[in-house]
Amino acid sequence: MHDTRRTRVVLAVLLIAAVALITLDFRDGGSSPLHRVGADVFGPVERAAGDVTGPVAGFFDSVTGNDSGEIAALQRQNDQLRAELNASQLGQSEEAQLQQLLQLAGRGGYRIVAASVIAAGGSYADTVTIDAGSRDGIRPDETVLNGDGLVGTVTEVSSTTSTVLLAIDASSVVGVRMAGTDQIGAVTGTGRTLSGADGMQLRLFDANATLRQGEALVTFGSVGDQPYVPGVPVGEVAGVTSSPGSLTQAATVRPFADFTGLGVVGVVVAPPRTDPRDSVLPPRPAPPAPAPSASASAGRPGAKRG
């Protein structure tokens, strides 16, 4: 449409007529016959204008907040979808750890609160932070484990998070019992597991006890089950370090838990009714079958004779 003088005059007349119709319709409460005339005249124009400007108006409404309720609903939906996506990704990466944790807790009779490790490291100690706290029923001096075994103890608690002192920290001391022999002793952390070295040292209280590589240890349990409940797998003897004539037997211990890959852990909020003893230990691999002797091989049918 060309911007001519005639066009401008027509638009002005239509505008004046529209104002007049609106005024009369307002005075008559919307019942004037002119209301229907105006609808018949301007209805097609409004629909055409709406078809052209509707998307643009919707865009500006979204920018200026004229439809804030719908925008808020869409934002909530986006947040929900994002949370579901994060939960799905978390489940895929840590589902195996959670299942293993639940199996260990079930075998030992421990009632736990499961949590995820959300931060690691401290100024002077080997600690991690988990996303569960007092509102989840967690208190200080409670045992923390994962699907492999002992992780540490709770030292500090807020409403939503807790700090866990790892069992491999240099200040950690855990009373342990040798599986099978019932020899008792203490395992201390060295603070070196996070750098790849063996992170625990064992000393047995009986100087005459015999230590062998590969023997497993479990927690002995503390008075009142705090900070350690009994029967939690700790680790296995990696090497004997004591010398003949020592007052105590000493060894390095390889922890069952991988402290460099902690994801899902469980805080024991109720101890087992009875000591699970060695029932929570991982199954030991079957010893290899002995190789057949030369005499047995010679006696088999078809064996060559010299």
Image: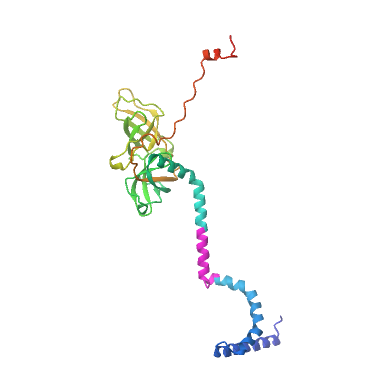
From the viewer's side, name the closer residue of 22 and 161.
22
Q: Is residue 211 above or below residue 163?
A: above
Left or right of residue 6: residue 226? left
From the viewer's side, name the closer residue of 128 and 273.
273
Dividing the image into 4 quarters, which one contains the C terminus? Answer: top right
| Residue 173 visible from this viewpoint | yes
- Answer with the quarter of the image where residue 151 lies: top left
From the viewer's side, name the closer residue of 273 and 232.
273
Tell me the residue at 52%/12% (across/down): 295
- Answer with the quarter of the image where residue 275 lies: top left
Tell me the residue at 51%/57% (across/down): 82
**Position of residue 265 measured from the top left corner of the image (x, y, whole percent):** 41, 45
Residue range highlighted in magenta: 62-80
- Answer with the quarter of the image where residue 271 lies: top left
**Position of residue 104 measured from the top left corner of the image (x, y, whole percent):** 42, 40
| Residue 125 visible from this viewpoint | no
Tell me the residue at 36%/48% (across/down): 163
Q: How many marks?
A: 0
Q: Is residue 70 above or below residue 215?
A: below
**Position of residue 4 measured from the top left corner of the image (x, y, whole percent):** 71, 85
Dividing the image into 4 quarters, which one contains the N terminus? Answer: bottom right
Q: Is residue 122 magenta?
A: no
Q: Is residue 99 above or below residue 28?
A: above
